[in-house]
Image: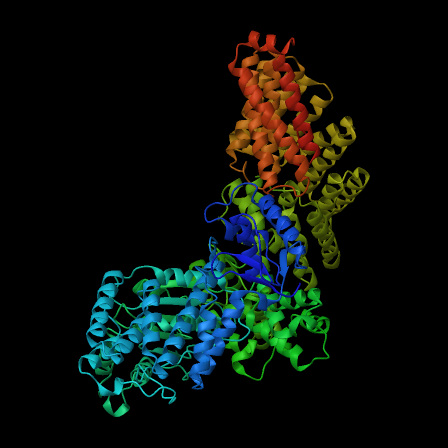
Amino acid sequence: MKPGLHFSILGPVRAWHEDAEISLGSPQQRSTLAVLLLHAGNYVSVDQISDALWDAAVPRGAWGTIRTYIHRLRLLLEEVDCRILSQAKGYALMVDPASIDSNCFRRLARSAHEAQAAGRYREAVESSREALSLWRGDPLENLFGDSVAAERVGLRQVKNAVLEEFSSSHLALARDHDVIATMSTAIIEDPLHEKFHEFLMLALYRSGRQAEAISTYGDVRKVLRSELGVDPSSSLAKLYERILCADPTLEASTEGSGSRITLQLDIPEQIPANLSFFTGRNSEAASILEELDRGQESRQSARVVVISGMGGVGKTAFASLMANRIKRQYPDGQLHLNLHGFDAEGAQVSTAEAIDWLVESMGVSRRQMPQSAEERVALYHRLMTGRRVLLLLDNARDSAHVLPLIPPTASCLVLVTSRSQLTGLVSASDAHVVELRPFSRAEALELMHKKLGPERMRDEEAAGQIIDSCGGLPLAIAVACAKAMVNPRFSLAAIAKELQDSRARLNFLANDASSMDIRSVLASSYQALSEEAARLFRLLPLLPDGSIGAAAAAGLLGESVPRAQELLDELAAMRLLDERTPGRYGWHDLVHSYAGELLAAHETQSERDRRLRLVLGYYLRGAQEAARSFSQYNDMPATDAAERRSLSTYAEALDWCQGQHEAVIQLIDTAFRTGNDRYAWQLPWMIRHYLDWDGHWDDLRHVSAIALQAARRESSKVGMAYARRSLSRVAHNFRDLDEAERHLNLALELFEEEGDVMAVAYTRRQLAGVYQVTGEYEKAHAELCRAREVFAGQGHVLGEGGAMAGIAWVESRMRRYEDSLASAQRALSIFEEVGELREMTRVMDILGYANHHLGRYRPAADHRRRAAELHASLGILERRNSHAGSAVIASLLHVAENEMLLGDVEAAMRSAVETGRHLVRYLELHQAGCIVPGTSKEVSRLMRELNSLVERMSSYAEKDEEAERGERGEKDPGEHHLRALFSLAYRAEQLGVISHLTFEA
C-alpha cells in the first residue's frame, strides 16, 4: 500500500491518496468498501456483505452484483498498491489499520481518556478535539445488518465519551465557554444524554448564567418525560438543587491548577473491565441494543436481560462487555454482584446477603441499615427508585435467586447471567433472553488469532482441529491457547494431537484456576442436579450419539417415560443437555467426555453392562415393532424383547427408523464389541427392511456382516441363517446374483437343520426373487409353490398370500396371464381380509400388468389407479423414502398408457399431468437433499424439461384436440407427450431419484 492513503467511514465513505480524493463509484460500491474496511485484514463472506448492503430481502443476483463491486474496487485501489484478496470464505482488504479514520478516532479517544485521568487536561483537550474532528457525519452511512449496527452504536458511544472527556477537561481548565458551545451542539444530536446536560448546566452556572442553567434542567426534564416517561437521574437533580442554592463548591478553580470537577458522589462503578481478546457475539450485542432502544412507558420495574448458556460459553465476559458499552446511560451507578449460583454448597450468595451488599454499595453503611430483612429490602427499593442504575447479576442459580433483586423502577437495567434458563424470571419480568452458544469456526479462529498472533496461526488446519476438539467452547479454546502460550515450542499440530483422544481431553484442558478449568466448571453444574438426574447424566454415555430422548432414557433407567422426561428437562435446564428439536437432546462433546468419566468412576462394570443391555433391549423392541408395522408377516426370530404398542402405522414406523437409524447402527457395533452377540445379530434383522427400502445398502452390508460374526461367536445356527438372508439381499441389490443365491442356499441348510419350516418357506420366497432377476422363472415358480404349501399347511394366511402374489407375478412374466390373474385374485382376497395395504398395492400392480398384456386396458388402468391410491394412503409420499413415491409414479404412468390405448386421450393427458406433477415433487425432494445425494445439475436440467412438458400437456388437455394436432402437424401429439414423459421418468430412474418404474416382485 502506498504511503499517504487513508479512508473515512465516520460519515460518507471516502478515500484519499495524499491530497487527492479517490472516486469510489456508486453508493452501493462505496458501501461494499465500507464493509471491507470495517473488517480490514480479515475475510468477509459474501453473505455478510449482502446483509450490510440490503436492509430488506436480498435481491436476486446479489452475489453477482457484489463481485462486480469488488472487481471495480480492485481496479481503483490497485493504482495505489492496495489489494483485495479473495478466498472461498470471502474477501479481505489489506490496508494499514492506521489508515482508517475510525481506528485513528479510537486511538485518540484512548489518549484523551488517559491524559484526562492523569490530570493532563490540555493534552486531553487536544486529543479530544483531534478525535472529534474526524467525524463528518453518521458512521457507516447506508449500511445495514446486526454487526454494522453494533459497530455504529459502539462508535457513537465512544464519541459521547470523548465529548465528556473534552468538556470535563475544559471545566478543569476553567474554560466554561468552550463547554457551553460543545455541549449545546452535542445536545442537539443526542438530547437524551443526561451527562451532556450536566456539563452544560454547570458551565452556564459558572459563567454567571444561573437562570439559563435552571431553564436547561426544565428542558431536559420535559424531553425525558416525553420520550422515555422518566424523570432526570438523581445526579442531574442534585446538580439542579445545588445550582438553585448557589452552592459555592460549584465554582470554577483557577485555570491550569489541575483541580478536577467531580459531578457525582458515591456513585459505584463496579463493572469488570472488558477482556482484551473478546471476540464475536455481534448479533447478540445488536439484539440487546435494539431491545434497549425500544420504549418502556408501560414498565413498572427494571428492564431485565437474561444471558444464558452452558458453563464456559463466555456469559460473564459478554455481559461485562455489554455493561461497559451502555454504562454511561446509567449515571447513578453500575453494580456487579457474583451470586456464585453454581459454586460448592454454602458458597452461594443468599438473597439477604445480596440485598445487604447492594445497599452498602449505594453508600449506606452497615450501622445505618434496618434490623429486619423486610425493612432492608424496602430500603433497597427506595434507594433504586427514580435512579438510573445498571445492575449486573452474575452466575444466578435460578429465578428465585434473582427475582427479589429486581429494582421496582423502569429507569434501571438488570443484566443476569446463568446456566439455567430462568423461565420464572423471564415470565415475571418480561425479560429479553439472549442465549450464547459455542463459537462458530470463524469466531473461534478469530479468538485464536487474537491470543496467539499470526505467526502461531499459520497452521490453520491444526487450529481447526483444536476448535473441533474443544467443540467451539470459548473457555476450552482459551485454555488450549494458554497451553500454547506457556509452551511456545509446542506446535499447534502437537496440541491438536493431544486433544484428539476424547478420554484424555479434559486432562489436557485442566487449569490451576477453578474458574478456568473445564472439568470444574462442568462439575459445578453436575453437583447442582438432583440425585436421580445426576445418575441419568452419568448413564447417558451408554446411549448412542444423537439418540437421547425420553423413551430411550426411560429404557436406560427402567423408569416411566414421563419421569424420564422430567429428568431430561432438569439436565437441559442446567445446560448439560441441549434440546435441539422438541423431545430430542444432544450435548457438547466435552460434556459427553465428562459424563463418561463419571460413568467409569461411579458405576461398576457389571452395572454398566446391565444398563447397556437395557438400552439394547429398548432398541430391539422398537426395531421389532417397526418391522411389524412395515409388514404383518411374522418373518422374525424369537426374541426376549417385551411387546410395545407405540408404532401403529407404516408412517410412524418409518419416522422411528429414520430418527433412530444412526443410533441403531452404533448400537449394533457396540453390542458386537461388548460381546452382546444375540443383540448384535437380532437388531440387524429387525432393521433390514428399512435399510433396504430406504437405500442404505452400505449400512445393510455392514450390519449383516457383523450379524454373521456375532451369530458364529454365539454358535447360533438361526442367527447365522438370518444373517445369510440379509447378506443375500445386499448381494441382490448390488446385482451379485451368484453370491445372493449362495447365501440363501446356506441359509436354507441352516434352517432345515434347525427344523424351522416357516423360516425355510420365507427363504424359498426370497430365493425365488433372485431367480426372477436372472430370468429363471420356472425355478422361481417352483420355489414359490413349495413356500405356499408350507404356509398353507401351517395356517399362515399372510405367508400364503405373499407366496400367491409372487406366483402371480412370475406367471405374468412367463406370459401365463390368465393364470396370473387367478393367482393375483386369490392373493388379493387374503390381503383385503386382513387389511394388508402394502401387499394389496403390489397385487393391484400385478393385475394391471396382466390385464394390460391381455389387451384389457380399462381394468388395467383401473387396477393401476387403485395401486396408486393405496400407495398414497400409506402417508409416506413426502418422506425420505423413494419406494412409495416411485410406485405411485409408475402406476400413474401405466394408467396414462392404458387410457391412451383406449383412445381416451383427454383422460390420458390428465393422468400424465398428474404423473408429471408427482415426478416434479419428487425431483424437488431430491434437490432438497431428502432422497439421494449428488447429481444436482442433471436433476435441475431434468426438472426444467419436466416442468415444460407438464405445462404443454396441461395446455393440450384444455385445448381442442384437432387444433393441437393442426399446430404440431403430427398425427397424435398426446401420444408424443406421453412418450416424452416416459423418457423423462426413465432418466429420473437412471439418476437414482426414483425406482421400480416397471413392477418387480
Which residue shows up at 54% across the image and 52% down it? Answer: 30
Colour scheme of the rendered structure: rainbow
Between 586 and 789, the one nearer to me in the picture: 586
> Outermost residue toward the left?
245
Q: Specify whether residue 599 is in view.
A: no
303 left or right of 816? left
Q: Quadrant of residue 693?
A: top right
Position in image of residue 489 (x %, y %): 73, 79
Position in image of residue 718 (x %, y %): 70, 50
Between 431 and 913, the one nearer to me in the picture: 431
Which residue shows up at 52% across the image and 30% down it? Answer: 833
Which residue shows up at 62% across the image and 35% down it? Answer: 799
> Outermost residue toward the right?
738
Q: Quadrant of the C terminus?
A: top right
Q: Quadrant of residue 725?
A: top right
In the displayed structure, 384 sits above or below 306; it is below
In the displayed structure, 837 sits above or below 156; it is above
Position in image of residue 126 (x %, y %): 46, 77
Position in image of residue 999 (x %, y %): 66, 28
Q: Quadrant of the N terminus?
A: bottom right
433 left or right of 968? left
Q: Specify whether residue 142 is in view.
A: yes
